[in-house]
C-alpha cells in the first residue's frame, strides 16, 4: 500500500460504497493507519482509501491533528456524508498528501456534522469544528473524487513560499 500521487484517475472519481464489514476491511484500515503514522513532512492527518489505490468509500482521520507530538488517535469513517454544516466559512491554506508541495487557500465550513458507519457497520454521527472539520471535508471530497486543485481558486504555493508568507505576518 502506497500513497497515490496526482495525476491518477482513481483520485478523480467518486468511490464505491462499502458493503462488507469484514476482516479484510479491518486489515485495510490498519494499513492506512500505519501509513498515516509513518507520514512525516508533512504529517498525515487524514487519508482516503482512493489515495492508497482502493475504490472504497472510507477514510481514516486523525482526531487530534493539532497535537503533532502526541500519540495519534484515529477514527475510521465508512460511507461518510456531511449531514449539516455551519454557515461560517473560514479560509486556510490546505495541502494534500497526493499533491506534494502544493498549498492553496481554501474556504471550508467552520463546523460540520458527519454521519458515517464504523467498522461494524453501526451508523454514528460526529460533530467537528476548526481544523478537524476541515480534515473531514477534505477526506469526503476525496471520496467524491474532488481535489484541492479544483476547490481552491489559488494561487498555489510551495511549502517554502507558504513559510515565507507566514513569516512576513509575524511581528519580529
Ligand atoms: Zn488529500
Image (cartoon, grey):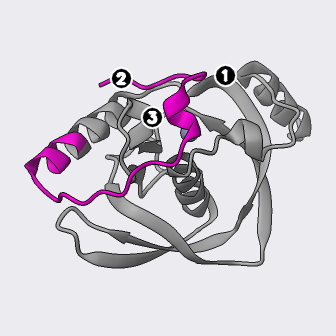
Q: Quadrant of ligand 1?
A: top right
Residue 85 x, y percent position in the rendering: 65, 76
Mark 1 to mark 3 CA distance (whole Å): 16 Å
Residue 51: assigned label: 3
Residue labelled with disc 2: 2
Percent x, y of residue 87: 77, 78
Query: Distance from label 1 to label 2 (Cα)?
Result: 18 Å
The residue drawn where x is 52% and y is 48% is 14
Per the model, the C-alpha gap separating discs 2 and 3 is 8 Å
Q: Which residues are magenta?
A: 1-28
Residue beneath the point at 34% across and 78% down? 124
Q: Residue placed at 46% from the left, 50% from the top?
A: 67
Mark 3 close to ligand 1, CB under 8 Å: yes
Image location of residue 60, percent across then percent down: 37, 50
Tell me if residue 46 is in the magenta stretch. Answer: no
Disc tally is 3
Secondary structure found at label 2: loop
Q: Residues within 10 Å of mark 2 (few under 14, many from 20)?
A: few
Label located before the other in sequence (2 or 3): 2
27 in relation to 164, above or below:
below
Q: Is residue 42 visible?
A: no
Residue 160, placed above or below residue 126: above
Of the 4 image quadrants, the one containing the N terminus is top left
Label 3 sits on a secondary structure element that is: helix
- Kindly report which numbered mark, 1 or 2, lies closer to the viewer in this rendering: 2
Q: Ligand 1: does it lie within 8 Å of the C-beta at label 1?
A: no
Q: Quadrant of residue 132?
A: bottom right
Mark 3 surroundings within 10 Å by alpha-carbon count, few (fewer than 14), some (14 through 19), many (20 or more): many
Q: Which residue is mark 1?
A: 101
In contact (CB < 8 Å): disc 1 and disc 2: no
Prevailing secondary structure of the magenta residues: loop
Left/right placement of residue 14 relative to residue 155 reads: left
Amino acid at each position: 500500500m502506497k500513497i497515490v500521487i496526482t495525476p491518477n484517475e482513481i483520485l478523480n472519481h467518486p468511490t464505491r460504497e462499502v458493503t462488507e464489514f469484514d476482516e479484510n476491511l479491518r486489515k485495510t484500515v490498519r494499513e492506512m493507519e500505519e501509513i498515516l503514522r509513518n507520514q512525516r513532512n508533512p504529517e498525515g492527518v487524514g487519508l482516503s482509501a482512493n489515495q492508497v489505490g482502493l475504490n472504497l468509500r472510507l477514510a481514516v482521520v486523525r482526531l487530534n491533528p493539532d497535537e503533532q507530538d502526541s500519540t495519534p488517535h484515529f477514527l475510521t469513517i465508512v460511507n461518510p456524508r456531511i449531514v449539516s454544516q455551519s454557515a461560517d466559512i473560514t479560509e486556510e491554506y490546505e495541502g494534500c498528501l497526493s499533491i506534494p508541495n502544493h498549498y492553496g487557500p481554501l474556504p471550508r465550513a467552520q463546523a460540520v456534522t458527519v454521519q458515517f458507519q464504523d467498522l461494524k457497520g453501526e451508523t454514528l454521527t460526529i460533530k467537528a469544528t476548526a481544523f478537524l472539520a476541515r480534515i473531514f471535508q477534505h477526506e469526503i471530497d476525496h471520496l467524491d473524487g474532488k481535489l484541492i486543485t479544483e476547490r481552491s481558486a489559488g494561487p498555489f504555493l510551495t511549502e517554502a513560499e507558504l513559510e515565507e508568507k507566514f513569516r512576513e505576518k509575524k511581528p519580529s
